[in-house]
Amino acid sequence: MREVSFIKQNKEKWLSFEKAIFNNDFKDPDELASQYIHLINDLAYAQTYYPKSKVIVYLNQLAAKAFQKIYKTKRENSNRIIDFWKTEVPLICYQYRKFIYIAFIIFFTFTFIGVISAANDGEFVRSVLGDNYVNMSLENIEAGDPVAVYKSGSNWGSFIGITINNLRVGIIAFVLGVFGGVGTLYIMFKNCIMLGSFQYFFYEEDVFWESVRGIWIHGAMEIFAIVIECAAGLILGASILFPGTHSRYTSFKHGAKTGIKILISTFPFTFSAGFLEGFVTRYSNIMPHWLSVGIILITLGIISYYYLIYPFKVQKEITHIPLINPSSI
């Protein structure tokens, strides 16, 4: 069968199925599961006979949405909390992976702007971080401990205070997405400029490596989580600006629900970053280099795997069903 005929034959079925899933019109879980099987057969057929077609991307996304719906309505008992992080969030991240990629591109761009600005303007770092913070950092550098600021206060006090602040930043970054994503971009710009200029400041003072060993022990998870939270804010903004075939209100509700799930998924990583900053970073200057680098690579690897690699594995598992009677389609 030619691709055009295949699409024409199934287009109405797919659109009807998408509308039913989006508006939660399925009352019978068995009916939903049956429709899902037909959809998987169509996807398998397209993968077999039209491997470069854009229809595969569409059917993949539709299959992910359907699987999430089935997962919520299935009758057997399950651990909802485990299922949320194990299956539901990865599928959402796969479906909205372009927003995550865009968030990272914006993150690196804004951070680079911060680096370039600090390199070309001697007063830029002070204008961003403030005179008190810069002077304190210079004193710490002279004392031989560039990241001494992370060692002030008690372990528990630092952990709780830092975690609350990071949660606040992430929530604000998401909520401000309601302004078409502009608010989220502002939060991202502000934090990335600070990060870029902050790191360049240590580079200029010839203590860049010492700063990396200290800051990124907790920063790998902390910064990564903020980027994901900003991606959630962009999803919220896009749901308002680009409702597609749905009403703007319906699209907004769906975008808000999706964004909140992504936001919540970052909380364990934010707590972990706060714990590392409160209990581990303060010992960065006395621990072996291999240990500090190992912690950075492990934490970065864990969160990168969860948001950038694992979603593809979950998506592949739910769509990897053998083709059934392709000649009958």
Image (cartoon, rainbow, N blue to C red):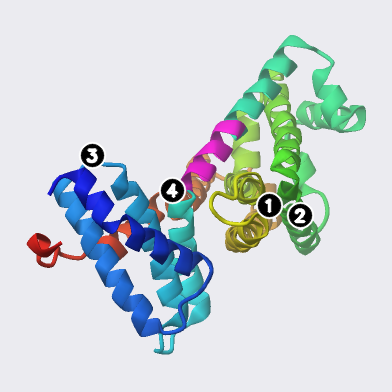
Say whether residue 319 is magenta: no
Q: Please, what secondary structure does the residue beneath circle 3 have?
A: loop
Say whether residue 103 is magenta: yes
Q: Is residue 285 visible?
A: no
* Image disc number at residue 277: 1
Magenta stretch, main secondary structure class: helix
- The residue under label 2 is which amino acid type? Ile
Closer to the chain start, of discs 2 and 3, is: 3
Closer to the chain start, of discs 1 and 4, is: 1
Look at 14% across and 47% down and name the residue there.
49
Mark 2 Cα-neighbour bin, 10 Å: few <14, some 14–19, many ≥20: some
32 and 218: which one is in front? Answer: 32
| Residue pointed to by mark 4 | 308
Q: Please, what secondary structure does the residue beneath circle 4 have?
A: helix
- The residue under label 1 is which amino acid type? Glu
Residue interval drawn in magenta: 97-106
Instruction: Give the number of the mark in front: 1 or 4.
Output: 4
Instruction: Give the number of the mark in front: 2 or 1.
Output: 2
Q: Please, what secondary structure does the residue beneath circle 2 have?
A: helix
Q: Are marks 2 and 1 in contact (CB under 8 Å)?
A: yes
| Residue pointed to by mark 2 | 162
Q: Mark 2 and mark 3: span between their CA atoms? A: 47 Å
| Residue pointed to by mark 3 | 52
Relative image position of residue 216 (x, y in whole percent)? 60, 41
Mark 3 Cα-neighbour bin, 10 Å: few <14, some 14–19, many ≥20: few
- The residue under label 3 is which amino acid type? Lys
Look at 20% across and 65% down and name the residue there.
321
Relative image position of residue 267 (x, y in whole percent)? 63, 61
Q: Mark 3 and mark 1: span between their CA atoms? A: 46 Å
Closer to the chain start, of discs 2 and 1, is: 2
